[in-house]
Image (tube, coloured by chain):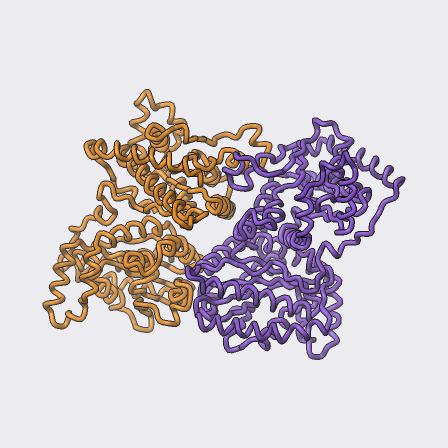
Chain colours: A orange, B purple
């Protein structure tokens, strides 16, 4: 969930200085339009890691925008008056009215997260609190509120570096009240439980935006742009001939400011020599075959799914996985266009029907992620549909995990040049020609759209319970061994957990 | 929640025989239209009390409708295949395709309810299971499914009578597998936890319909009519020029078949003589004054709200409550049209701002129930809005209860004749003339609409944690004493609970 926010996003001063005046002007205009319409309020929730620039960003937004139309509330220790009433009263009394913007620091999520990190509540209560928050946000959205939820993130290394630098800065040192942040345990717990909250509460009507907080210019511009685009979309929706009453969230999931995407951050040069490959392949295949026979896995289903760029080598990687297995030990499910029968059902139905039984190994060659990849990019489903699909997928996968399924998800990635080379090879080799179609060339034209879709997908569905493994597949040998090794490690880990 | 299903609804044979042919014809037509459109599936969930006619009703529906387009599934003991997969797999594999109808006996609610009744899970897990069910139903609804949830109800006396009669019937005796149903404890637990499930899971997109199951003709016709009207509304929505994709639930909440409504079932002849009244009034007022000073109430807010027909005597009843109190001990909140400031907020905001503090007593003269009464009947809000308001109100009241507020809700009811008499009196008495307006006369013309709205309101928001008290107010003296006594009893009960 935090993958894209740990790759070192940054923006140089020149670009920043050039972008800011226009952004400020547009934000102000949107704000005045919001005020003039007075059709809906905007609510911004701020959460995340200490030192990731939460306070600074809000301060900046207040400078950029008209502060008379923004109210910032920080909910720390409740007052006597607040303690005398139901918990939510303190939030209700501060809700921004139509036409205005409210920024909530230390909101309902901070409370439940802190309680969980300090062991005051357990997982079941955290889940109940998240469900309660969802009902509140759904109601606010039904009543017209446009909700933005920002999670400011830092990798542990960057957080430590940043807290160090702030400590020496006389202007900022007062902030480090929470010195124990630098104890690595606090960070780990915070991120672990925070990730759970984000997974459970990122819904189409109020999604989370994870912002990498290390670079001040990057985080400021990103937050500003997300606000602007979401605001403009909502304002336009209200001005339509048949205005919508509740605010569906239409801010873009990714603002591609520094053109640094998760996939670009991979080291695509990784390779494996022929000899090493042969050796490692055979070893990993033997290990897999043995693991799958382990009696301790008999109570668990295993599900490996493969997604990737066209010509990234999904098929050949799958063949290396199955190469050393008895055909009775696994089943491969090929996902193509849905059948008539499948189209008459909710979209997840065709995946549910293929869920592995306990003790069985199922390989998905493409998967339910088609919903947020090809169906999104090609417009086979509406934005409403693919926006809610992230939460539906997370719900689905949570049910798999709850049923003890070992779930391993691979995205095989190649760069654009490598794809071109492979496409041409396929065209030139008679027995490979069937593999390349007009459609592949068309998809290639949408390379960047697919890139954004993949980054969104990983950000929203790579969860602690079901993480994505990104496989650098320019070198097929490297990719195949990485796939097998990852799968084996997941199986071993699940055996070690010993349920 | 079960109030309207314990008043002895019934339909005579003649009416039934006259209504059935037309209903069957219309149901069949709707079914074929559903099949021809093939735009959405229908899912019917069946739950409720043993002996309330669940099985019989479904059998009948199968006779009335085309069974080729209906599939009934009963989910009892899971099969080996089902046990080998995630819990929900068994439901997914049986989902009806578009154009078809699926009837689920023993669905997700039965499982969680049984687990709770038998102590296998606790309240927190029940709440989590309900939240999970909500996510599933929301997803199904977003994917187009039209969901009906029926709870077949019987009062404990009627259940016992019915189970006795079935026992002696050779055709039915096999059904009484669950003999322990007749142990009064099972019934109580079942209804207690069932009510909680209904409260938490009755949402606008998939509301519960509570059906009184004692009279076979009544329950058959009622279920048939609810299905028919919901189905016709959904079919029409799809056939519109801009068809809706997800199915908002538009079946009527009440089907007024036997013209027996909750309010009609009250004994409106109850009276109190002048002397008794004086005596009891003074006693109850003194008791209230004492109770409100009890130190054990200092940690609890008290909230009494008054709704009722025009001229039912809300004002004078409230004056009798406050009559013996020091003005510093209470606050009265008059709810009229919202102010500009309130209109710029979610609709519940103006009630949240007036929530009592711990140790304080607040009286609401009219309340948040205006949303589902006057605003519904007069069209001040859309059906979408008042339909979701029931769940929003239940969420709100749950938060009050969680914050230890003692919540007492009164509906003061008079009959139409008494209202007319009082209206005329007001017109003829100079100092009362200000109390009667054109609007009162207009409301009177919608007497029946208000009656339906009240019955829906009580059925959907009279919960174990926040029950409605219906006050027979033809006799003002009787009403005033009942109000005071009910309030005092609620306060005493909350002191006894001693938190």
Rendered view: A323 above or below B184? below
Name the foreground residue: B331 vs B196. Answer: B331
Task: Find residue B332 and report its image quarter.
Answer: top right
Instruction: Provide residue A492's location: percent of width, then percent of height.
Output: 34, 57
Residue pictured at 69% horizontal, 31% vertical = B330
The answer to whether residue B118 is seen in the rendering is no
Residue pictured at 37% horizontal, 59% vertical = A406
Among all residues in the image, which is located at the extreme left? A428
Task: Find residue B479 and report its image quarter.
Answer: top right
Name the foreground residue: B478 vs A136. Answer: B478
The answer to whether residue B498 is seen in the rendering is yes
Instruction: Provide residue B35's location: percent of width, then percent of height.
Output: 46, 73
How many numbered circles are shown?
0
Among all residues in the image, which is located at the extreme bottom? B170
Rendered view: B450 above or below A317? above
Instruction: Provide residue B314's location: percent of width, then percent of height.
Output: 72, 41
Left or right: A25 as drawn, with respect to B337: left
Name the foreground residue: A185 vs B64. Answer: B64
Report the quarter where the C terminus of chain A lies: bottom left
Among all residues in the image, which is located at the extreme right? B275
Name the foreground residue: B20 vs A265. Answer: B20
Residue pictured at 69% horizontal, 34% vertical = B297
Instruction: Provide residue B114's location: percent of width, then percent of height.
Output: 60, 61
Left or right: B492 as drawn, with respect to B224: right
């Amino acid at each position: 969930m935090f993958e894209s926010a740990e790759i070192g996003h940054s923006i140089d001063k020149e670009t920043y200085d050039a972008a800011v005046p226009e952004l400020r002007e547009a934000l102000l205009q949107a704000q005045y339009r919001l005020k003039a319409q007075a059709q809906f309020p905007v609510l911004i929730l701020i959460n995340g890691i200490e030192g990731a620039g939460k306070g600074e960003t809000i301060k900046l937004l207040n400078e950029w925008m008209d502060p008379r139309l923004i109210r910032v509330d920080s909910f720390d220790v409740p007052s006597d008056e607040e303690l005398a009433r139901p918990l939510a009263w303190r939030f209700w009394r501060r809700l921004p009215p139509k036409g205005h913007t409210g920024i909530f620091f230390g909101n309902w999520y901070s409370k439940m997260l802190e309680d969980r990190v300090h062991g005051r509540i357990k997982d079941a209560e955290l889940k109940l609190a998240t469900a309660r928050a969802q009902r509140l946000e759904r109601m606010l959205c039904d009543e017209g509120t446009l909700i933005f939820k920002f999670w400011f993130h830092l990798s542990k290394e960057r957080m430590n570096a940043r807290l160090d630098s702030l400590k020496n800065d006389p202007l900022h040192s007062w902030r480090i009240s929470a010195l124990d942040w630098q104890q690595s345990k606090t960070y780990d717990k915070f991120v672990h439980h925070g990730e759970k909250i984000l997974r459970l509460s990122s819904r189409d009507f109020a999604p989370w935006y994870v912002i990498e907080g290390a670079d001040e210019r990057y985080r400021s511009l990103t937050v500003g742009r997300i606000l602007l685009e979401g605001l403009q979309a909502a304002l336009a929706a209200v001005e339509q001939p048949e205005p919508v009453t509740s605010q569906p969230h239409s801010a873009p999931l990714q603002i591609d400011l520094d053109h640094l995407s998760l996939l670009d951050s991979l080291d695509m040069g990784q390779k494996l020599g022929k000899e090493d490959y042969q050796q490692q392949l055979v070893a990993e295949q033997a290990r897999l075959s043995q693991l799958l026979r382990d009696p301790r896995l008999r109570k668990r289903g295993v599900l490996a799914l493969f997604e990737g760029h066209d010509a990234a080598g999904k098929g050949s990687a799958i063949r290396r996985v199955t190469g050393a297995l008895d055909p009775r030990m696994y089943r491969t499910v090929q996902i193509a266009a849905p059948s008539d029968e499948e189209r008459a059902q909710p979209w997840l139905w065709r995946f549910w029907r293929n869920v592995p039984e306990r003790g069985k190994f199922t390989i998905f060659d493409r998967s339910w992620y088609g919903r947020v990849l090809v169906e999104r990019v090609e417009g086979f489903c509406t934005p409403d549909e693919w926006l809610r699909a992230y939460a539906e997928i997370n719900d689905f996968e949570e049910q798999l995990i709850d049923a003890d399924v070992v779930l391993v998800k691979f995205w095989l990635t190649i760069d654009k040049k490598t794809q071109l080379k492979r496409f041409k090879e396929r065209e030139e080799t008679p027995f490979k020609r069937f593999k390349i179609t007009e459609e592949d060339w068309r998809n290639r034209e949408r390379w960047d759209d697919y890139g954004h879709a993949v980054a969104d997908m990983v950000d929203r569905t790579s969860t602690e319970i079901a993480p994505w493994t990104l496989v650098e597949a320019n070198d097929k040998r490297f990719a195949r061994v990485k796939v097998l090794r990852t799968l084996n490690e997941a199986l071993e880990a699940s055996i070690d957990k010993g349920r």
